Every structure is written in C-alpha cells, then in structure tokens.
Image (tube, rainbow, N blue to C red):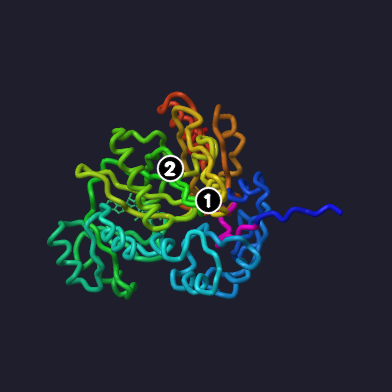
C-alpha cells in the first residue's frame, strides 16, 4: 500500500500580495499555505492558498488558521503583540516569535529595544501632550516628524509637525501618544533583508536603496549607491539584530543614511516591499527564503542574478483607472517583469510592481520606470 507524503503546511496571518507571492513560492516547494483574511477574493486566495475566513484580531480565527500547521507566520502587522503572546503561551508556534514580532508592530517598543541593544536610532520621544511636543521641538528643532506607535503603513500614520499646535488634534485623536523624531536630512534610505532559519542559519541579501514618495516606497535599486563600507555596516547591523532578537523568518531593516551615519528607522518581520526585486534579481526570492526559514530548512543563496536590478511599484492612479487595462503596453518594455496583485484599483493603493535586471543601473531603472509609467497611463 502506498502512502501519501504529508505536505508541510504553513499558516499566514493576512491574505494580501505578500501572502500571494509567498503562495507562488510555496507551490514550487510543495508547501501548503493557509491564509487568514476576510476577503474570499484576496490576492493570496486567488493564487490558490487555502482560505480561512476571519479577522486578525479574533483569537478564535487565529487558532483556526494555526491548527494543524507547522508554524504561524505573517503578511502584515495586524494581530496585536498581546494577542500573539497569548497564542504563543497556548503552544502555537509563531515564526517569528511574539516578542520579536512586536518590534515590527510597535515603533516605540522598537526604539526602546534598539536603544537598549546599543543600535543607532534617530533621537525620539513618546509624547502625550503639546508641552512634551514643544520641549522636543525646542531641543531638536522644527519641523518634527510624529508617528503613530502602532498601525501605520505606507506613510499613513506619519505626519510632519511645524509647531506644537499642529500636534493638538493628533494627540486628541490618539490618546496612546505619538512617537516624535526630528525631521532628518537623509542622504538616502536603504534596506537590508535578512533571513534566519529556525536552525539559526543566517542569510543576508545585498543592500537595496529605496526611494519613497509621500511616505510610500516607490522604487528599489540594487546595488544601493552607498559606499561599500556603509553597505557592510548595514549588513552587520542586520545580522546582529537578527541574532539578538532570535529572528525566525525574513526581516527587512529599514535604515536612514544621514551625514552622521546609519540610523535604524523601522523593522518588518515578514517578507517586505523592499524585497520584491529578489524574485527575479536574486538566486532565492525573499518569499521562498521566508518559507525555508520558518520551516527550519536550509536557506538559499542570495547572490544577485545580474549586476543591476531596479524595481518600481505600481500605485493606483489619481483618476481611478486600472493599470491592468494597460498591461500589454508594459509587457512590450524589454526585460520588464510585471507583477500585478489583482487588487481593485484605488488612487494611492499599491497594485503591483515591475522588476528589470541587467548590466547598467541607469538603463534598468529607466526600463522599470517606463513600464510603470505605461501602467499608470502617464505615457502613451
Ligand atoms: N524622522 C524622519 N525624518 C525624515 N524622513 C522621515 C522620518 N521618518 C520617516 N520619514 C520618511 O517617511 C517614510 C515612512 O516612515 P516610516 O517607515 O516610519 O512609516 P510607515 O508608514 O510605517 O512605513 P512602512 O510603509 O515602511 O511601514 C520613511 O521611509 C521616510 O521616507
Ligand atoms: Mg517604513
């Protein structure tokens, strides 16, 4: 009698494009991906992941999605640190663990812990009153940047304050307080992706330069145009952090490069937008790597597949039109790898990305931007 091998099953909180691209990697590894979300037509569900309907703040739904899976992982930050700690205490295996994941979910906690680890972060304070905002502005100068400690993404939950009065309504609306930082002069922004397997094996990716517009990541370029000593420093910082927090899975470390050096801005403990270029640009994509890491499997090589890689995001145009209608034009751009997430088009919503690999950084960037402009309807 023949037996059918049991396929490893991984659960994910979230059903968006990150889970969709994880599902694409899961297919090749014969891993079954199960996702938790509310939308039966979500990107990961359409891609064939098993759908467990439910909300990420519902303990029963989280238990349901984790049941029978080797590990519970994440495509977003929605399930609160407190809820994840409860699940972990019940014996649910989380990757990353609740304590490490919290560093990506709570910016104040992250600042505190990074400070305690002696890693460089921007000057910061948690403010509950306009007088605290005034005091911080007096010390660090105006304007300031105020951030929601929890729940922000794509620049939503990040505000520039020109004076303390500008904080009044925000403080009223957010009684948990605001994380304050000086508005820094940035040389550029970079990110380091790193995976740590459940076995402790580490694999870092080449440093990527990210370009944000209105707080949202719009472009990625690899290799980053930073001195190699800075890139090495960023890689070493990510490795140290991964080990000290006991990371399991993939992590993106977002860094500011300032005249004074590198500062850690934010952590994401999951596959991340700054790593979409790895699908065609690296020997092992961030999505496959994440699966390998959470399952305790050997990690894949992270070398570049080409000397230069550029990636740009497709974002819903202001006129509400759907980039999908213009797909053939973008596909005609030589070398353009187009990824569309199949989400309903809304202005300002991330709907896809385009990656181009090649020899020359300027040429690959121009091709990626041209394909995206065609999708946006900005070019005939
Ligand atoms: N202190 C600062 N000084 C200058 N620019 C800043 C500062 N903080 C944030 N920014 C800009 O705003 C962007 C978004 O900030 P941040 O990453 O903290 O927010 P987010 O909305 O949580 O982002 P994400 O979508 O990556 O989760 C940064 O990438 C950077 O371009
Ligand atoms: Mg960020």
Percent x, y for residue 287?
A: 55, 47
Q: Residue at x 39, y 39 (%)?
A: 207
Does residue 347 appear in the picture of this structure?
no
Q: Which residue is mark 1?
A: 293
Residue 10 in magenta stretch: yes
Furthest residue in direction left, as rendered: 138
Q: Residue at x 46, y 40 (%)?
A: 312
Percent x, y for residue 137?
A: 16, 61
Q: Work out whether 100 lies above or below 214.
A: below
Q: Work out whether 147 lies above or below 229.
A: below
Element type at mark 1? helix
Residue 168 in magenta stretch: no
Q: Residue at x 45, y 27 (%)?
A: 307
Q: Residue at x 23, y 44 (%)?
A: 261
Mark toward the start of the polypeptide (2 vs 1): 2
Q: Work out whether 72 lies above or below 188.
A: below
The residues tagged by marks 2 and 1 sit, at their Cα atoms, a distance apart of: 12 Å
Element type at mark 2? strand
Percent x, y for residue 351?
A: 53, 49
Q: Nearer the viewer, residue 47 or 94?
A: 94
Q: Quadrant of residue 59?
A: bottom right
Q: Quadrant of residue 65?
A: bottom right
- Of the 4 image quadrants, the one containing the N terminus is bottom right
Q: Which mark is residue 80?
A: none
Asked whether, in this view, residue 1 is left or right of residue 80, the answer is: right
Q: Which mark is residue 204?
A: 2
Which region shows up in magenta? 9-20
């Amino acid at each position: 009698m023949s037996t059918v091998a049991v396929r490893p099953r991984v659960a994910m909180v979230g059903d968006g494009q990150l889970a969709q691209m994880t599902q694409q990697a899961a297919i090749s590894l014969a891993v079954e991906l199960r996702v938790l979300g509310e939308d039966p037509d979500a990107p990961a569900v359409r891609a064939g992941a098993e759908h467990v309907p439910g909300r990420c703040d519902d303990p029963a739904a989280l238990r349901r999605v984790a049941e029978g899976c080797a590990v519970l992982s994440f495509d977003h930050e929605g399930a609160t640190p407190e809820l994840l700690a409860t699940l972990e205490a019940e014996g649910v295996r989380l990757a990353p663990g609740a304590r490490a994941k919290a560093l990506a979910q709570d910016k104040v906690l992250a600042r505190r812990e990074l400070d305690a680890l002696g890693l460089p972060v921007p000057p910061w304070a948690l403010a509950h009153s306009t007088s605290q905002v005034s005091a911080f502005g007096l010390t660090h100068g105006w304007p300031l940047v105020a951030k929601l400690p929890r729940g922000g993404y794509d620049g939503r939950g990040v505000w520039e304050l020109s004076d303390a009065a500008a904080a009044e309504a925000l403080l009223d609306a957010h009684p948990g307080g605001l994380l304050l930082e000086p508005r820094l002069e940035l040389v550029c922004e970079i990110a380091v992706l790193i995976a740590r397997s459940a076995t402790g094996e580490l694999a870092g990716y080449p440093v990527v330069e990210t370009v944000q517009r209105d707080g949202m990541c719009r472009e990625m370029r690899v290799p980053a145009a930073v001195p190699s000593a800075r890139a090495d420093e960023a890689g070493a910082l990510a490795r140290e952090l991964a080990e000290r927090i006991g990371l399991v899975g993939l992590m993106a470390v977002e860094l500011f490069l300032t005249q004074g050096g590198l500062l850690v801005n934010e952590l994401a403990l999951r596959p991340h937008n700054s790593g979409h270029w790895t699908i065609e640009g690296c020997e092992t994509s961030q999505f496959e790597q994440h699966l390998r890491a959470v399952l305790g499997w050997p990690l894949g090589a992270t070398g570049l597949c080409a000397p230069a890689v550029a990636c740009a995001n497709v974002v819903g145009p202001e006129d509400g039109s759907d980039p999908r209608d213009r797909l053939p034009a973008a596909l005609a751009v030589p070398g353009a790898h187009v990824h569309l997430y199949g989400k309903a088009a809304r202005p300002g919503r991330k709907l896809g990305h385009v990656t181009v690999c090649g020899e020359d950084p300027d040429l690959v960037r121009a091709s990626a931007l041209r394909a995206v402009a065609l999708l946006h309807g900005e070019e005939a």
